[in-house]
Amino acid sequence: MLAYSSLSLDNLEIKEEAEKALRKECIDVPAYKAIEAAHPVNFYTPNPVIKIGLFILTAVIVCFSLGLLTLISFDMLRSEKGFASLCVFVGLACYGVLEIFIREKKLFRAGVDDALLWSAAGLLVCSVTYLYDGYSSPISWCFFTFAITLLATLRFADMVMAGVSFLALLGLAFTLLIKLGPVAKTVIPFAIMVLSLAVYAIGRSWMKQYAFRHYNWCLTVVSVLSLLTLYLAGNYYVVRELSNTMFDLQLEEGQSIPGALFFWIYTTVIPLVYLYLGIRKKDAILLRTGMILLAAIVFTIRYYHSVMPLETAMVLGGLVLTTGAWALIRYLKTHPHGFTYVEPDEPSLADKLKVESLIIAQTYTPGAHTPSNTTDFGGGTGGGGGASGDY
């Protein structure tokens, strides 16, 4: 399914881990060279500056090519559907060139392949949506965006495509539920919560499976987005303002939505649950997402209930965060279960890479040293006993 060589991707991951181990002085330079020689990577991945330049250059070439083809076939493109058909052709051409470059030039995150992938996906989504149902149907937009970006994610393991695919799936579920009537509008927040939680659980389980190892970054992006949407779907501010805007509730200032108590509790509790589970499960994604969403709690409460001056609230908030950070650091420094604030003393990266085994396997050649069964003594000038030569 992947367009890239699985062996090269595995070797690239080993090389990156070896570089981390070298920076942490877990291994020395000869060991790193032995690992690098034993696991060659035939991808072309330039430095970030060249990558950005190649991305911009490729995007400009795609735009100029589309413009040139439009001018050449201007007489034939007498309708919007004709131009959409041309965009489909250009999008398929970008995809074909992308496949050729990856197979022949071994491009991997080189800027050129990223630009071709995004160009192909963008052109195909816009043109196919218009040819199918025009631009007036949100369901068509969400469906084709989800389908095309999902296929692109499976083929190229692109993080951006994975994130867009997940958001398009939520958009598709949202637009379908709106069509089902007033009762469905009431359950939309809960449906988004359930869908986000299911995607997060599936993504985390897939990250532990060897078959999905090359999609770890994609699954990480989807996990973060699913945690955010799981919270936002029940955030009081989001639910109230979105319902007031899209569903014409016509709420007055200070008037609450139905089930306000539940959404207030959900708004304040979920980030704390993320923090607790992040510490307990040693999960950095949960921990960092919970820390970010603490600001959402403060914003939501301050937006509807100004219980104290802003300066006082900021000072108290800073004291609470500082105290919490200090307590968490002390807890992690002495926590006996392996999740700690302190830098690890053990060369865990080297252990993970099995550096010793790699060096022995790749540098020791069986049969290179053959011990002799005879013992030959050299000469010397020890002062007798048949010795001759130097001592």
Image (cartoon, rainbow, N blue to C red):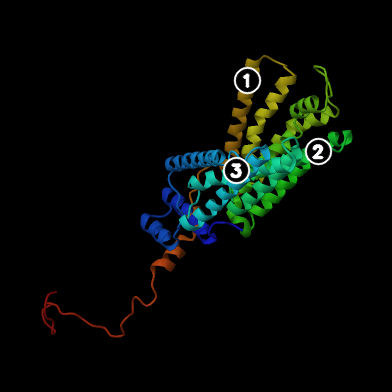
Badge 1 amino acid: Met
- Quadrant showing the C terminus: bottom left
Q: Quadrant of residue 173?
A: top right
Does residue 85 appear anywhere in the picture?
A: yes
* Measured Cα–Cα span from mark 3 to mark 1: 35 Å
**Dividing the image into 4 quarters, which one contains the N terminus?**
bottom right
- Mark 2 residue element: helix
Residue 343 on image: x %, y %: 50, 44
Rendered image: mark on residue 82: none
Q: Which mark is residue 160?
A: 3
Q: Which label belongs to residue 314?
A: 1
How crowded pointer 2 is (Cα within 10 Å; few <14, some 14-19, many 20+) is rated as few
Q: Position of residue 294 (x, y in %)?
A: 66, 30
Is 261 positioned to the left or the right of 353 in the image? right
Q: Amino acid at mark 2?
A: Phe
The answer to whether residue 220 is left or right of residue 20 is right
Tell me how far mark 1 sits from mark 2, CA to CA: 32 Å
- In the displayed structure, 285 sits above or below 107; it is above
Choose the circle earlier in sequence order: 1 or 2. 2
Q: Which label number is shown at residue 190? A: 2
Give the mark, 3 or 2, whose residue is nearer the N terminus. 3
Kind of residue indicated by mark 3: Val
Between 160 and 201, the one lying in front of the other is 160
State the residue in front, 127 or 383.
127
- Residue 221 visible at all: no
Residue 210 falls in which quadrant of the image?
bottom right
